[in-house]
Amino acid sequence: MLPASLVRSDRRHRAIVAAVGALWHGFADMGVVESGGAFVVARGAGASIWDADGNRYLDATAGLWFTNVGHGRREIADAVAAQLGTLAHYSNFGDLVPETTLVLAERLAALAPVPGSKVFLTSGGSDSIDTAAKLARRYWHELGRPDKTLLVGRAKAYHGMHVAGTALSGLPPNRDGYGELMPDTRTVAWDDAKDVLALIERVGAERIAAFFCEPIIGAGGVYLPPDGYLAEVRAICRAHDILFVADEVVTGFGRIGGHWFASGRFGLEPDLMTTAKGLTSGYVPMGAVFVAPRVAEPFFAGGTWWRHGYTYGGHAGAAAAALANLDIIENENLLAAAARLETSLHRQLAPLVELDAVVEVRSGIGAVAGVQLADAAAAVAAVRTLRAYAISTRACGAGALQISPAFVMTDGQVAELAEGLRAGLDRG
């Protein structure tokens, strides 16, 4: 059990309860939130957060997969403040661009898993997915193959909540109630490359524009790729002239341990790679789409306009945050820290399967883990219970608890995390 000092009384373990008022929370039953109040996060430092009553919690999710360098980094805040005081932002449409945005694009291109890639900057992960979806279709149009419009996703997959990402979702509840948001999308099994081949046989490769693939399924429940799966689906896409889109909104910028991107670790060489979250560690919203040379070439040859972009894509203040964030990752060797967490999380969390409440712990690749509960419906209640044990986590997929801490989490804090999870789940 946890030390008595870490177990909150019923009064203390609940964060300050705020009336809902005007705020409509995302991914929430607002009737439940309105009756129970909100869990208010007041501040953060490193791998910890504090509620408005002053209670500390280990942040098991790094916000929402994004605070890779940890909370409270003054270097990032100062870089943003300096940029905003000089030039907050300016459009990068046409031939315009803020200087900081240009510097960031060059730095990102140097990290790309495919040399010579171009970088299209967005406002976040959902923007990046919609950008990749449109670009994949437009690319084939430019090559005189306009019938290649079908976009393929996987069961359990999450690709953001814009129209394209929702249509590609492998999580049916995320699509329910909207009708057909986007024609020409299909879903295949998340873990069987032969299902991709079966789809190709049914509809024909001449119809398929792109295959969207999270190297590790995140919000769908933290599912690691079966051995050899990623290499096999990548080879299928190459053989059938289908663009391979690596969705690295969660896995990008170090979370897969020892590599900037999962695409590098698994040798995927994606045609398009979508990113966000860890690009700025969530300090300011930003995303980026990496575009391999062959996909960019028709648009850089001259005479072609791609009429797409976002007012705040490549925002100068966000670019300053990203540059400072990348400096921290490099200067503090946080890629190695994520690799350490890969081992530490696996070692400390795997024994949780001994609990009656836990049926599986998915870990061992990157600084991520999914603790699958036996009673899927109990996951949301378990999240609330675990706050009594100084743990802030989140339900994801079909009854899993998300573990994706900041790279600065120590091995001692991982042990504290495992102890809190064990005590809270044992309690039920």
Image: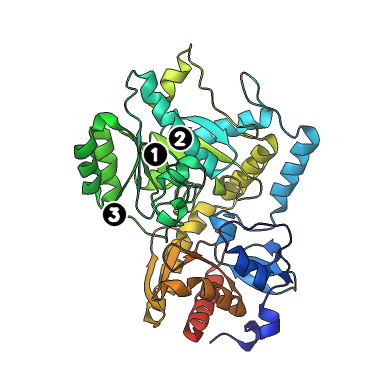
Q: Can see residue 423?
A: yes
Residue at 38% x, 55% y is 156
Visible residue check, residue 241? no
Q: Secondary structure at mark 3?
A: loop
Q: Which residue is identified by label 3?
A: 191
Q: CA distance from mark 2 to mark 1?
A: 8 Å
Q: Is residue 303 left or right of residue 56?
A: left
Q: Residue placed at 73% from the left, 67% from the top?
A: 19
Relative to 230, 374 lies left or right:
right
Which residue lies under the disc numbered 2? 132
Q: Label 2 to label 3, Cα distance in Å? A: 23 Å
- Amino acid carrying label 1: it is Val
* Marks 2 & 1, CB-CB < 8 Å contact: yes
Tell me the CA gap for discs 1 and 3: 16 Å
**Among numbered discs 2 and 1, the one appearing first in the sequence:** 2
Q: Is residue 412 left or right of residue 221?
A: right
Rendered location of residue 148, percent (x, y): 32, 28
